[in-house]
Amino acid sequence: MEPLIIESTKSTPMVDFNAKNRILIIKGQSYPENSFKFYDPIFQWLDMFFTTVEDDDGLIKLEISLPYINTSSTKCILMLLEKFEVAEKNGRNMDVTWYYDKENENELECAQDFKEFVELEFNLIAV
Amino acid sequence: MTSDNRSDIFQADYKVLDAAEKVLQDLEGSDNAIRPQFEEIYLGYKRLLRQSSHLIIIADRQQKRLIDLQNDIVEKNRELEALSITDGMTGIANRRRFDEVLTQEHARHARSGAKLSLILLDVDHFKAFNDNYGHVQGDECLRQIARVIADCTTRPADLAARYGGEEFACILPETDNNGAIAIAEKIRCGIIALALPHKCSSVADVVTVSLGVVTAPCTTDASAVDIVTQVDELLYQAKSSGRNRVEFVKSCCGAV
């Protein structure tokens, strides 16, 4: 499966989803004018990934860093994390890490908000 | 769906869920073919409603953080603005503020025709004071002088500023020459009253100042800079004619 690589812009994060090593990275500010247009290819890639990936207990790593995120992107990230919730319930081995800037209290609080509402274990790491 | 709080913004949404639940209960045990499909729609709606309520909580919190941050920045900007127009050492207005206010007041007085006065003063033999007592004492001397000048210029529009090293200036809006001279004298005497010893001064045993006072004519084509030049000359006169004195224009056409 082809990796999904999207360069970051001022208002959209960098995306590097690699099916081979099972490391999925999303990193950067997210406030596109049309969030769904940006996130839809990511959802499609993930749906394909979860249906085709070999179920051999290999760890799937998701690494997130979102210093600023607007409301529609928040919806998209909730949708994205829900896909991981479902995958985990289906027995996939997940490791989700949310990186935040230790200087930025808002970023940590935002990550904690997601943690509160998503039924998925994730690590919060200051960088 | 059982909601913890039926008065929240999703009240209407929960009502839809309740109605759907009732239909599901009514269909319980029946062989109605639509039931599984209906249940799937019901569960889908429930899941999306849960997601939406989470979204709104997260977005509201995010928004609150941004508003708090914005308020902090506004507050910090105010502080920075105050710092940028204050002389760090003496706590009174700095040169930047002086120039700004003088330009504004000059324009305002040119329009209204009111009298604008300016005092420029310089500490007598301050270099000798510094050399003799050290810079810590020198700074303390300037701080005390600044306090006296500020205390003598208390009307809301008055401005006392540190003009440069040991030079200070006062902008006195709507003040005639006599009024300004009175304030200058008050400053001069107030500084003598501080009784700061100055044994290297040729003028007195204590710290003294020389002052120039100018009152801009009511109808002036002159710029704010011209008034400064004029008051600077008067200060120079006060220095060269013995220091510890107030110099002003002894107008042949009467006091302005």
Image (cartoon, coloured by chain):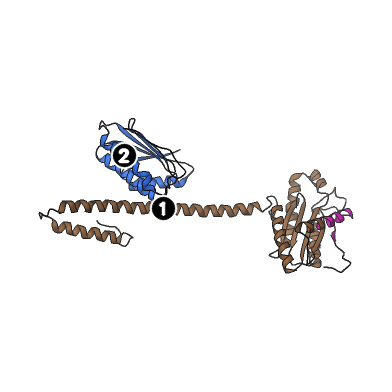
Chain colours: A blue, B brown
**Residue B20 or B94: which is nearer the viewer?**
B20
- In the rendering, at what x and y percent does residue B29 appear? 10, 54
Q: Looking at the picture, which amino acid does disc 1 mark?
A: Arg
Assess whether residue B255 is covered by the magenta stretch.
yes
Q: Is residue A113 visible?
A: no
Q: Looking at the picture, which amino acid does disc 2 mark?
A: Leu
Q: Is residue A25 visible?
A: yes
Left or right: residue B231 versus residue B158 is right
Residue pictured at 42% horizontal, 51% vertical: B62
Residue beneath disc 1: B61
**Residue B40 or A112: which is nearer the viewer?**
B40
**Residue B142 or B88: which is nearer the viewer?**
B88
- The image quadrant of residue A85 is top left
Assess whether residue A42 is covered by the magenta stretch.
no
- In the rendering, at what x and y percent does residue B40 appear? 20, 51
What's the magenta region?
B231-256
Labels 2 & 1 near each other (Cβ < 8 A): no
Residue B235, placed above or below residue A41: below
Residue pictured at 31% horizontal, 59% vertical: B10
**Cα distance between the residues tagged 2 and 1:** 28 Å
Residue beneath disc 2: A46
- In the rendering, at what x and y percent does residue B31 appear? 10, 54
Q: Which mark is residue B165?
A: none
- The chain letter for the residue carrying disc 1 is B
- In the rendering, at what x and y percent does residue B52 appear? 32, 53
Q: Secondary structure at mark 2?
A: helix
